[in-house]
Amino acid sequence: MSNLPHLDYYRIDRAAKKIRCEVEDLIHWGANNKINLCIMLNMAYSYFYSTVDVHSLNRKFESLQNNYNGYKEISKYSLIYSGMSSDEYNFPFFNENGDEFSVADGDASGLWAIDCESLKRIELNGYYDKGLVVVPTGNSCLEGFFGCALPESAGVKITEADLWMTWEDVERVITNNFFSGTQHNALEIKASKSLKISNVVSERHAKRREMVLIAAIFCKGKYPHECEGSIRAWANCIERYATDILYANGGEPLSLDRIERILGKAIAGKALGN
């Protein structure tokens, strides 16, 4: 058993056992910029921000590795999915009026590092629920700051049970090779500033969602049998018969996955009738 290879990442309680310390110690070191602690995301709706020029960013984004599910690998552990159709998938970032950040919306999966201030709240109160901004875990494939804001995380309690560590950070503790105290300060400042422009992305998302729901109601009324059976079937019906409605305002083409997710959330929230 001792010859088994190490895991790529660990839940924080298992990491503490391997290191032979307390979970509270790891949270303390994370809160004080010594190590990275992460959350595990699975298709979490997100706003992405970068300080890189939008044209350079889109060119770099296009060249990033795709995994088998169509995710772009921002780092070894952090993945994003833009939700655009194949024609537009490579160019999801935009910048309006020379804003400081190039922005996009999409879905985040994998491990993403939590900032120190959020970890300090967990250390002090046992949870954090003010809405998360996270950054890629490990070495990012993109230059400059790249942040991920989770607009649906406000009010959701993040506790120690939600925290993970990569093998690299476990080894960092074991070998007493902590980060310097200032390494991530710039990232935290930019991440907090990025929240102020989230309305730019949320307005675009609201318009996109509105058009999907209008198209969904149209298809439900005119092609009810093709909308039955699953949300995916409904999304397929929209793509087949309602693109004129969906893109009436010149919006970017959406993938079936994104249409399906918008429909699923609307149904869960009872925004659409039967």
Image: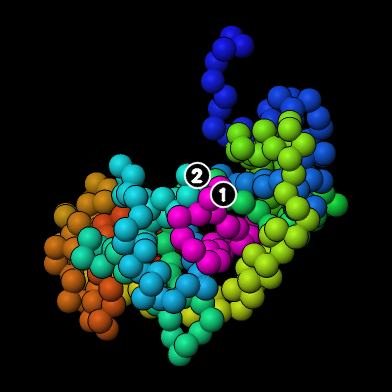
Look at mark 1 in the image and give the residue it sits on.
Answer: 137
**Upstream in sequence: badge 2 or badge 1:** 2
Q: Where does residue 85 sit, x and y in percent of width and height?
A: 25, 62
Which corner quadrant of the image does residue 223 belong to? bottom left
The colouring scheme, among rainbow, by chain, secondary structure or one colour, is rainbow
SS under mark 2:
loop
* Quadrant showing the C terminus: bottom left
- Tell me: residue 171, above or below residue 102: above
Residue 258 can be seen in this image: no
Q: Where does residue 250 sit, x and y in percent of width and height?
A: 25, 81
Q: Residues within 10 Å of mark 1 (few under 14, many from 20)?
A: many
Look at mark 2 in the image and give the residue it sits on.
Answer: 77
Callouts 2 and 1 close, C-beta under 8 Å: yes
The residue shown at (18%, 71%) is 243
SS under mark 1:
loop
The residue shown at (26%, 51%) is 232
* Quadrant showing the N terminus: top right
Magenta stretch bounds: 131-156
